[in-house]
Amino acid sequence: MFVFDDLVELEDRELQTLLREVSGERLGIALRGADTKVREKITRNMSQRAAEILLEDMEARGPVRLSDVEAAQKEILTIVRRLTDEGAVALGGGGSEELV
């Protein structure tokens, strides 16, 4: 089962596709409960300015209810599943599959 922290397994290009589909506000809330590796991978795949704005918004927001964080993460995972169905994202290491 794919969970939010598994976003670190996505290829950079796939993660960038996902980021185009997610609002900055929802992403900031979802990252509150995420592992540091996930935060770093996501901010590395954003423009420097967008990453700065995201991190500033996260700091300025203050405490967020855990249920809101989980709802935002679930929303992003729904987008990942849709992108997988569309073929834009490959879950489970599909990016390293041998091509013939």
Image: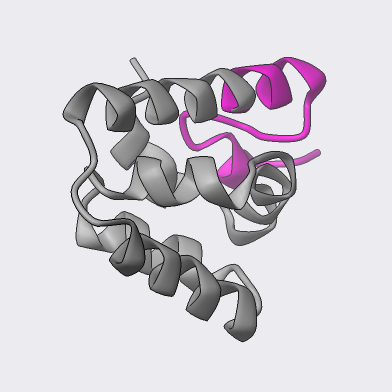
Which quarter of the figure is the C terminus placed in?
Answer: top right
Q: Quadrant of residue 3?
A: top left
**Residue pictured at 61% horizontal, 43% vertical:** 95
Task: Indicate left or right for 15 with 43 as reference.
Answer: right
Q: How is the image coloured?
A: one colour
Q: Quadrant of residue 64?
A: top left
**Residue pictured at 69% horizontal, 57% vertical:** 13
**Residue pictured at 48% horizontal, 69% vertical:** 43
Determine whether 10 is above or below 38 in the image: above
Q: Is residue 99 magenta?
A: yes
**Residue pictured at 41% horizontal, 74% vertical:** 56
Q: Is residue 10 visible?
A: no
Looking at this view, is 28 or 10 the one in front? 28
Looking at this view, is 45 or 75 the one in front? 75
Q: Which residues are magenta?
A: 80-100
Q: Is residue 7 visible?
A: yes
Which quarter of the figure is the N terminus placed in?
Answer: top left
Q: Position of residue 93 (x, y in %)?
A: 49, 37
Q: Is residue 40 magenta?
A: no
Q: Quadrant of residue 41?
A: bottom left
Q: Position of residue 10 (x, y in %)?
A: 51, 47
Looking at this view, is 88 or 19 the one in front? 19
Determine whether 34 is above or below 51 in the image: above
Question: Outermost residue toward the bottom?
Answer: 48
Task: Indicate left or right for 21 with 77 as reference.
Answer: right
Determine whether 49 is above or below 99 in the image: below
Q: Position of residue 6 (x, y in %)?
A: 35, 38
Task: Indicate left or right for 8 with 76 as reference.
Answer: left
Determine whether 33 is above or below 53 in the image: above
